[in-house]
Image (spheres, rainbow, N blue to C red):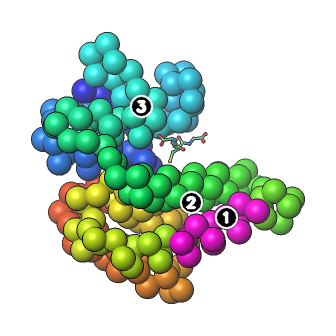
Amino acid sequence: MRLFGSLTSPYVRHCRIALLQAGVEHELVATDYAASARLSPTQRVPFLEDGDLRLTDSASILRHIREQQGQDFLPDIQDFDFFLLASTALDTTVNLFLLERDGIKPDACAYLQRQVDRIGSTLTELDARTRHHPERTRPLQSDALLRLGCFLGWALFRERLALGAHPALRELLEACEQQELFARTRPVV
Ligand SMILES: N[C@@H](CCC(=O)N[C@@H](CS)C(=O)NCC(=O)O)C(=O)O
């Protein structure tokens, strides 16, 4: 299998952890914006090649890896919703980060301000849901919690968030960081 991505992307990190958990032989192909624009219709990373199969999103990649191991991917509807909520917060935070790199700040228009508000309200909800999640002390056992852990790790690495107001999220990230595979895939520039 060839996973195309960067060492900073939280979506790629999630896939890398799943591949390591599965013990699947794979190659991580370093892919920058120019290469992803040439090689993937989404112009994003990650994307995956496995023989004739090409997948263009971390969710389908994760499902493929889990199913190859005989596991269901997010079979519980509440966990699936948790995963999507964390992904929405992550997508929004990444978009604002990339816009700011191009000099556009959230005060530029009402729509961007709504993105900031969306991140705040999803984090509040995720904090509440994490507090009661049965796997919160074993976060690498759940793709929902692992998605959130990868998001939080990236957001702190890029200094996009502070977790002072979200104690359950802080504890979740600490629980993730104690896991060897999470530590091994820490973002590096
Ligand atoms: N829904 C996609 C999102 C992937 C994504 O946003 N990747 C970022 C890297 S962290 C990217 O490649 N962004 C480039 C861009 O938006 O131009 C997934 O889950 O794989």
Image position, residue 99 (x, y; %): 71, 52
Query: Of callouts 1 and 2, which one flags the residue occurring earlier in the amino acid sequence?
Result: 2
15 is within the stretch colored magenta: no
- Left or right: where 104 falls relative to 17: right
- In the displayed structure, 153 sits above or below 84; it is below
Q: Which residue is mark 2?
A: 89
Please name the residue shown 57% across and 31% down the image.
Answer: 43
180 with respect to 60 (left or right) = left
**Residue 9: image x %, image y %?**
44, 49
Q: Secondary structure at mark 2?
A: helix
Which amino acid type is shown beneath numbered disc 2?
A: Ala
Which residue is depicted at the point 47% across and 77% down?
Answer: 128
Q: What is the CA distance from the residue labelled 1 to the residue labelled 3?
A: 27 Å
Image: magenta residue range: 114-125
Secondary structure under the numbered disc 1 in the rendered image = helix
The answer to whether 181 appears left or right of 161 in the picture is left
Name the residue rendered at 29%, 28% in the picture.
2
Q: In this figure, which residue is indicated by the disc labeled 1?
A: 118
Q: Dot 2, crowdedness within 10 Å: few (<14), some or many (≥20)?
A: many
